[in-house]
């Protein structure tokens, strides 16, 4: 299935996977959208298209392994924030343990770093996050979030 067809839709890819058949396609977005795939290994070697693939994989709940050094070094921190936001749960247990009542979930859902001046870096939120969506890091992101918007 799809050996020479770059336009194989995700439905055909899913059907092949359900039958236990091998499937080859050049359609990276179909791979990101297929239900039978849990993880995407991003090896495109390009920054713009690689970012689009990673964003689509995140949108469809896939785990992403980035092997593209250029993409990782330029947009990696921003893509991580996007992935963390997608993993954020709705029970907001992080906010329940915060001694400063910071609305951590709001930051994560917006794809932003927690930058509230009230945050005392106690890391209580990190320890209770059931989805591992929170990490402690210092420094500035190397780009702007609007750079992550895929071109139409």
Image (spheres, rainbow, N blue to C red):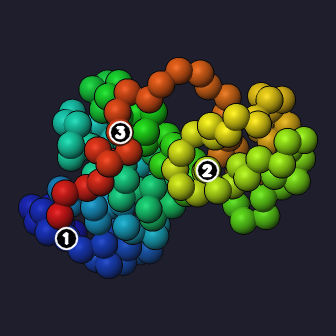
Residue labelled with disc 1:
8
Q: Is residue 94 above or below residue 115?
A: below
Left or right of 88? Residue 17 is left
Q: Which residue is mark 2?
A: 107
Q: Are marks 1 and 2 in contact (CB under 8 Å)?
A: no
Q: Earlier in the sequence, mark 3 or mark 1?
A: 1
Res 133 quadrant in image: top right
Q: Along the horizontal axis of the image, is 143 left or right of 91?
A: left
Label 3: state its secondary structure.
Answer: loop
Taking the spot 67% from the left edge, 28% from the top edge, the residue there is 136
Which of the marked residues, 1 or 2, is nearer the chain's N terminus? 1
Considering every residue shown, the one lying at the far top of the view is: 139
Query: Which is nearer the eye, 20 or 59?
Result: 59
Residue 13 visible within the image: yes
Residue 35 image position (x, y, % from top left): 46, 70
Which residue is disc 3 drawn over? 144
Task: Quarter of the image for the C terminus: give it.
Answer: bottom left
Please provide percent x and percent y for residue 12.
28, 77
Identify the element where label 1 is drawn.
Answer: loop
In 3D space, how far apart are the residues under numbered discs 3 and 1 (Cα atoms)?
Answer: 33 Å
Residue at screen point 38% across, 73% down: 14
């Amino acid at each position: 299935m799809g050996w020479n067809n770059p336009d194989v839709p995700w439905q055909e890819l899913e059907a092949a996977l359900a039958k236990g058949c091998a499937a080859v396609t050049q359609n990276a977005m179909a791979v990101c959208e297929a239900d039978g795939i849990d993880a995407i290994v991003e090896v495109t070697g390009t920054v713009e298209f690689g970012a689009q693939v990673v964003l689509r994989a995140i949108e469809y709940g896939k785990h992403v392994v980035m092997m593209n050094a250029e993409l990782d070094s330029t947009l990696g921190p921003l893509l991580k924030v996007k992935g963390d936001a997608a993993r954020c749960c709705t029970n907001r247990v992080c906010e329940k343990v915060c001694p400063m009542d910071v609305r951590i979930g709001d930051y994560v859902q917006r794809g932003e770093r927690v930058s509230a001046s009230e945050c005392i870096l106690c890391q209580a939120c990190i320890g209770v996050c059931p989805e591992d969506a929170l990490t402690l890091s210092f420094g500035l992101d190397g780009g702007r979030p609007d750079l992550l918007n895929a071109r139409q």
